[in-house]
Amino acid sequence: MEFLQLVSQIFGYLLPVLGTIALIILMVVGIKVTKLIKKVENSLTNVDATVSNANNAIVNLNKTIETANKYVDDFGVTSKTINNVSMTIEAVRYTLEQMVKKFIAKWTKEYEQIKKMILTFLEKLENKDKVVIADAKKENHNSTESEE
């Protein structure tokens, strides 16, 4: 029993010391936890501000994307219009090209006919001139003979 009394006395002396140490450690841990909670609170405030800024940036980005989409839609309409105008111009060019080709082909054909007609007409005129000149020479010749 003496042993238990001795142990009881030792623990009687140690218990207040250990309790005091435990309280000091608990106070230090409490202070550190309080500082940690304040840091977490500040971090959460900063995170809230960052998230708010990010949300504002996303809203602005959405507005920019909407504006870009409007421009892209307008560009799509404009490009379709330009494409339609281009196709129309190409159709007009092709039609005009075909018309010119047909005109040249017909003109060439008609040119040959007109050329033949003009040459025939000129030959007839030339023959008439030869006949008229020959008749005039005969008359001149006959008139000079009759004068002699």
Image (tube, grey):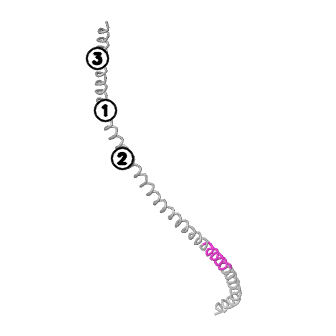
Q: Nearer the viewer, residue 44 or 20?
A: 44
C-beta proximity under 8 Å, tags 1 and 2 = no
- At 41% from the left and 55% from the top, the residue drawn is 84
**Residue 37 forms part of the magenta stretch:** yes
Residue wearing tag 1: 114
Q: Quadrant of residue 34?
A: bottom right
Q: Is residue 145 above or below residue 106?
A: above
Q: Quadrant of the C terminus?
A: top left
Sequence-first tag of 3 and 2:
2
Q: Where residue 54 sits in the image (x, y, percent)?
A: 59, 70
Q: Quadrant of residue 83?
A: bottom left
Sequence-first tag of 1 and 3:
1
**Amino acid tagged 2:** Thr
Q: Which mark is residue 95?
A: 2
Q: Where residue 55 sits in the image (x, y, percent)?
A: 58, 72
Residue wearing tag 3: 135
Q: Nearer the viewer, residue 40 or 123?
A: 123
What is the magenta range? 35-50
- At 52% from the left and 67% from the top, the residue drawn is 66
